[in-house]
Amino acid sequence: MGNPIQAAALFLPALALAALLSGCAPSMPNVAPVRLADMNGSVTFPLVIELQEGDRIPLNAALTGDLVSTEPSAQPPVVVVKRHFFLVITQGKMLVSLDGKTIAHTTGSFQFGVGVDKEKGPKATLSMGVNEVH
């Protein structure tokens, strides 16, 4: 992939959906983790990306289609990593490891809606979430 920040920006929004579809957890691949800032654009799989608390990643999000689309934003939203974890990408799956040794059990959510706010008028809302199962 090209720019590592853009590559991660593509991976992170899909994480919530991947968590929903992951099924039974496979074993952790035997590859050295790479820090997002150290990625050079050359990606091979399996891939383990180490994310640290406080990492900030610009989010490149777009809605495309025949009926609706998003306008490009001069100030893209920023994903802020809340705790240290590893993003594991292998065999078409995107999973999470909290310790770099085992795959964590996660749940994900995805919501899209259209509504009207009394003060701000019409709005579209897109929300994704990923949570560790305790």
Image: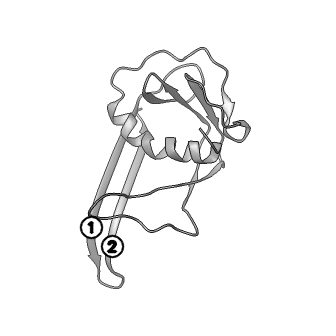
Q: What residue is pinned by disc 1?
A: 114
Q: Quick check: can you spot residue 78?
A: yes
Say which amino acid is labelled 1: Val
Left or right, residue 95 beside residue 82: left
Between 118 and 42, which is closer to the camera in this rendering? 42
Q: Are marks 1 and 2 in contact (CB under 8 Å)?
A: yes
Q: Indicate the secondary structure of the residue bearing disc 1.
A: strand
Q: Position of residue 77 (x, y in %)?
A: 54, 61
Of the numbered discs in the image, which one, if any, rests on residue 74? none
Q: What residue is pinned by disc 2?
A: 123
Say which amino acid is labelled 2: Lys
Count the numbered circles shown: 2
Disc 2: CA contacts within 10 A as few (<14), some (14-19) or many (>=20) = few
In the rendered image, the quadrant that contains the N terminus is top right
Q: Indicate the secondary structure of the residue bearing disc 2.
A: strand
In the rendered image, the quadrant that contains the C terminus is top left
Image height of 50 relative to 16, above or below: above
Left or right, residue 29 beside residue 111: right
The residue that appears at 66% across and 39% down in the rendered structure is 36
Q: Position of residue 57 (x, y in %)?
A: 61, 51
Q: Position of residue 5 (x, y in %)?
A: 63, 47
The mark nearer the N terminus, 1 or 2, is 1
Classify residue 8 by image quadrant.
top right
Classify residue 18 by image quadrant.
top left
Q: Quick check: can you spot residue 107?
A: no
Direction right: furthest residue: 38
Between 13 and 86, which is closer to the camera in this rendering? 13
Disc 1: CA contacts within 10 A as few (<14), some (14-19) or many (>=20) = few
